[in-house]
Image (spheres, rainbow, N blue to C red):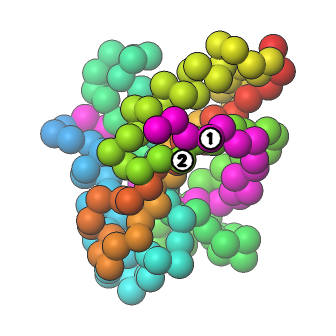
Amino acid sequence: MKPEIKFESPEINRVAFFQCIGGYEPIATVWRNIDDWLQSKNIDFRKRRFAGFDHPHPAWMKPPFGYVAFMILNDDEGENNTFEGVHIYEFNSNGMYVSAQVLIEDMQIAWDTLFEFKEVSDYTFDTESGRQYFEEHIFTGERFNQHPTYFKIWMPVKKK
């Protein structure tokens, strides 16, 4: 089933930032590193939001492929460029985004729906402005290291 496309703002200012470039399965590696960090700092993942994106993106650059994942911080956290020993990144999420949320196993359907939206709407993707697309991973299980239940793509857009 196709997801609904929504116009919304992700409202993200700071994130606790993790990255893995190269090696075997950088996506799995970076999420494992977050899981280890959450456990070592006794952070309740159920009260947090998590997301990530390809960097460098495999379609745009030569190997090695990499992935960035992050935990979205509350407004009062990370003001000194670190949070619980992790580097903080100022996230530029200003402006309009569209989102599509699906069950994790339907993530390709979400991507396909966003590209169809771009073709038929008055909007185009706006990644040149410095705003980052990202994939929110929504966990509903009892353990963080289980696969997320939902996958939500956030894509910055602008009028054509």
Q: Is residue 68 above or below residue 88?
A: above
On the image, numbered disc 2 is attached to which residue? 101
Camera-side residue of 115 and 4: 4
Residue 43 in the image, given as x and y percentages of width and height:
44, 82
Q: Is residue 134 visible?
A: no
| Residue drawn at (47%, 66%) of the image | 86
Instruction: Report the disc number at residue 77.
Output: none
**Mark 1 residue type:** Glu
Marks 2,1: beta carbons within 8 A: yes
**Mark 2 residue type:** Gln
Residue 82 in the image, given as x and y percentages of width and height:
56, 68
Residue 19 falls within the magenta-colored stretch? yes
What stretch of residues is rendered in magenta?
1-22
On the image, numbered disc 1 is attached to which residue? 4
User: Residue 65: which quarter of the image?
Assistant: top left
Camera-side residue of 47 and 65: 47
Camera-side residue of 93 and 99: 99
As helix, strand or loop, the secondary structure at mark 1 comes to loop
